[in-house]
Image (tube, helix red, strand yellow):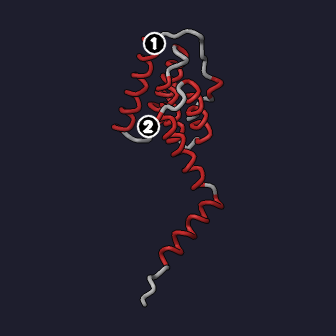
Amino acid sequence: MEIPKVSSLRRSGKHDQEKAQKHLKMGNLMIEKAQAESPGNAKLFSQAIAMYGRAIAADSQLIEAYLALAYLAWKLEDAKAALSFCKTALEISPGDPFALSLSRQIKQEINLTDPPKKKQAQMVQKSEATLKPISC
């Protein structure tokens, strides 16, 4: 399953909020259904991604659609795409708390999965586990 790039989404100058909200809700329902039935239901996830893309095509300022795609991309282990969607969301709504929080979580995860940093974190954990209090 492939997450689209922000630049590939058709973003018109139009703002059909009603249509955009309809697509957003459909995408959200598909995600809920996928998680309830079987967490790895690729078909429903693909359909949700398409719905979020349609929502953005209808209203390019719909931050919720970008954040939904960011979250999906992150869960599908495409951190680069996830951060790109967060960045776009923050361009639309600077300081949005959810976009900032999600972006921070993704960046933290990237740092923890970076081999040198992961190894360093494991070494720190190991050394902390072997430290014993000194009794006087």
- Specify the quadrant that holds the N terminus: top right
Q: Mark 2 — residue? A: 41
Residue for point 50% across, 20% down: 62
Mark 1 Cα within 10 Å, few/some/many (few <14, many 20+)?
some
Say if 93 sits above or below 58 in the image: below
Location of the C terminus by quadrant is bottom left
Which residue shows up at 55% across the image and 69% down it? 124
Q: Residue at x 40, y 22 (%)?
A: 26
Q: Give the SS element for disc 2.
A: loop
Q: Amino acid at mark 1?
A: Gln
Of residues 62 and 91, the one drawn nearer to the viewer in this rendering: 91
Identify the residue at the far bottom of this view: 136
Kindly identify the residue that appears in the image at 56 percent across and 30 percent down: 90
* Residue 48 higher or lower than 78, as above or below: above
- Note whether 51 is above or below 81 in the view shown: above
Q: Which mark is residue 72?
A: none
Quickly name the residue at label 1.
Answer: 17
Number of disc labels: 2
User: Left or right of 103: which side holds 115?
Assistant: right
